[in-house]
Amino acid sequence: MENKIILQAAQISIGYSHNKEKNLVASGIDLTLRKGKLIALIGANGIGKSTLLRTITGIQKTILGTVLLNGTNIHELDALTLAQNLSVVLTEKLPPSNLTVFELIALGRQPYTNWIGKLTGADSIKINEAMELTQISHLAAKKHYEISDGQLQKVLIARALAQDTPLIILDEPTTHLDLLHKVALFRLLKKLTDETEKCILFSTHDIDMAIQLSDEMIIMTPEAVLQDEPCNFISKGSFNTLFKDEHIVFDNEKGKFTIV
Amino acid sequence: MTKTNRNTVLFILLTLGVVLLFVINISLGSVSIPLKEVFSSLTGGHSSKETWQYIIINYRLPKAITAVLVGMGLSISGLLMQTLFRNPLAGPYVLGLSSGASLGVATVILGASLLPPFIATLIVSPYGVVLASSLGSFTVLLAVLAVSHRLRDTMAILIVGLMFGSLTSAIVGTLTYFSTAEQLQKFTFWSLGNLGNLSWTSISLLSICAAIGLLLSIFSIKPLNSLLLGENYAKSLGLNYKKSRVIIIFATSILAGSITAFAGPIAFIGLAVPHIAKLVFQTSNHNVLFWSTLLFGAITMLICDSISQMPGSDITLPINAVTSIFGAPIVIWLLIRKRKMMS
């Protein structure tokens, strides 16, 4: 296969360990993230999507097994190398500050700047490219608290793009957005993976849209964590295992959930 | 582009302001010395009156230098804390660092009588006081940091700072029972805050401590900028969070601790000045904010000190009274505005 593997996890167990007590969230997880793929992570609330994302971004350790980023254990990489290979878009609110959109995106260049954080010409080019790709150049001089939620989400994605990493991981980027902005965001992510060869992994509750636009999906259920292409999941009927409720049924022909 | 130009002009104005206020500060006092004479004395020439020369070199100049160091140091420590705690109301005085330093100093000055005379004279030396004071502020900062991890709430952290203040004043109160009248007087004078009375030796020691604190702060500019996005984003940008946090905490304690040791607990400068800088420069970028806070700190302290001298009269107000009159309204104003800033 030509598709280069960026991140790989084989048979990992995730969860939290307090002192000696282990709280296992999921185990036996196999994941492979390849260049140029848009991958959606779906699952019911509380199933452990965030724990999985925290684990493969190296914020949290695995209970068993290792996560390999470009063939190296993610916890053995130094902070800077990690920052040059993996960028994130989180759900948490930004602390209050006077940062402008441009300054916020420019912070994405920190893994490349000198000790005082001076931007070079090459850095400015990357920042402007990121703003053009996300179509927010006109917002550059605005303070980050003056713009709408949808625009802020784009700014945060632009920040991750400016970080110029082969892998971007987003935690629920479409929450708080209306249908129009959700669609725009999904299409932006799709465009980015097609045009820049980056791999983008995101968690979402918008399963219908994820089925239509993503290249691969990762489904989390209490029984297993599976990775495959959306059409294969449909033919296998995997979406019906997602929610433990007989009233929610996946309609294979329409490709969406219906309430019975 | 216009913004960079605006900043350049502001920085030039601020630097000129510091120089001007420095000279004015020296010329004002119970004896008013003409500006021309101050200039000639400072540039190595002779002033026309021997007494003026004496006053400038031995009294006014050390005081003005102390004012600059105190203003810069406290303001920068406030800026570091506001970014580290993600809290616009953080500052060395409000969070109880000054109380911690007071406790350290009180233990040394008041508790000395409980120790054998030889050790007592050793620890009451300037070095002993600085060390005790820095340790005191360091301890309180660590405690506040531990609590702030559990309480993300701005108000809760401030209340914790307040509680540390009450706790330390209670301990200091208890210590006064065991001390002599002379020690008590010494401590009371210290606690009112005083920029004068510093020997050149003390000033050199204070300068070294301030220089270490400020240098560490300069090296923290990039980490501080990434912390504007919160801890997790900062880590994802390659920040060694634990290391940077230790450096920032160390810089804050050495600045607040050494200044409090020499000049007493000075209120509100650390909280208010960074906000003046943020307001004037309209930025959160620490590359700009650091230098503007530094200059505004020096300016504010020189002004407060000039006011406390009550030019033309023999009275000198405690510096703490002046900074509180100026700082407390700013805190109230910030609290009223806070809702807007947080949302």
Image: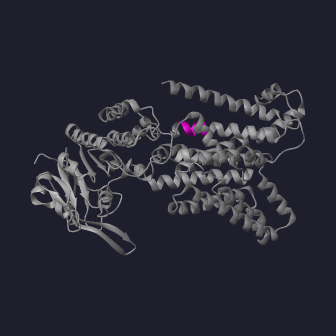
Residue B212 in view of the camera: no
User: What coloring was used for the rendering?
Assistant: one colour
Q: Is residue A47 above or below residue B83?
A: below
- Dominant SS in magenta: helix
Residue B51 in view of the camera: yes
Residue B187: give x, y in percent of width and height: 79, 59
Residue under the image location 68 percent in, 46 percent down: B269
In the rendered image, which quarter is residue A234 located in? Answer: bottom left
Is residue B113 magenta-colored? no
Residue A182: give x, y in percent of width and height: 29, 44
User: Which region of the structure is painted magenta?
Assistant: B288-293
Does B115 sit left or right of B100 as displayed? Answer: right
Residue B152: give x, y in percent of width and height: 51, 58
Residue under the image location 79 percent in, 53 percent down: B192
In the rendered image, which quarter is residue A158 located in? Answer: top left
Q: Is residue B100 above or below residue B262?
A: below
In the rendered image, which quarter is residue A46 located in? Answer: bottom left
